[in-house]
Amino acid sequence: AVVGVSTVTVRTASNGKRYYYYRMFIHSSHRVPYLMRAVTNASRDFLATFRHPDGEMESFVVVTENPKLMQQGTRQLFERHGYTYKGKTSQGLDCWEYPFLQ
């Protein structure tokens, strides 16, 4: 059985900034405390040092598709882990960014 999946794609913003766009799904019967945080941070930390063949990415972007991740406690969790809240997408989802390049 598939417990969950995470995917990463390279995207380019309208200003030319290139970043990793991260998505994750964990089946509801396998959601346990801190699993999302552990998988997201492990992916972020791996990609921070990954030498992409097309060059460096400027950041790691997460869009929270699960409404439970848009609650105040989760927002504070993202902030404690170095993410910056970038606002809502056109679909009303929270967008977070972790910068790789300063």
Image (cartoon, helix red, strand yellow):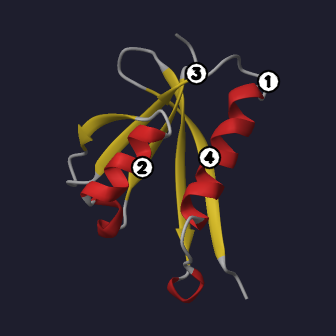
Q: Residue at x 55, y 62 (%)?
A: 36
The crowding category of the residue bearing disc 4, from other C-alpha atoms within 10 Å (few below 14, some 14 to 19, many at least 20), is: some
Q: Nearer the viewer, residue 49 or 19?
A: 49
Q: Single out the mark in the foreground, 1 or 4.
A: 4
Task: Return the disc, 4 or 2, that comes first in the chain's sequence.
Answer: 4
- Residue 8, percent across and down? 61, 47
Task: Return the disc, 4 or 3, that comes first in the chain's sequence.
Answer: 4
Q: Nearer the viewer, residue 49 or 54?
A: 49
Q: Which residue corresponds to mark 1?
A: 51
Quarter of the figure with residue 3: bottom right
Instruction: Give the structural element (helix, strand or loop) at label 1.
Output: loop
Instruction: Give the structural element (helix, strand or loop) at label 2.
Output: helix
Q: Are marks 3 and 2 in contact (CB under 8 Å)?
A: no
Checking the image for residue 41, the label placed there is: 4
Checking the image for residue 77, the label placed there is: 2
- Give the left or right position of residue 67, taking residue 28 as reference: left
Q: Calculate the distance from the C-alpha at mark 1 to the C-alpha at mark 2.
A: 28 Å
Checking the image for residue 100, the label placed there is: 3
Q: Residue furthest top?
A: 102
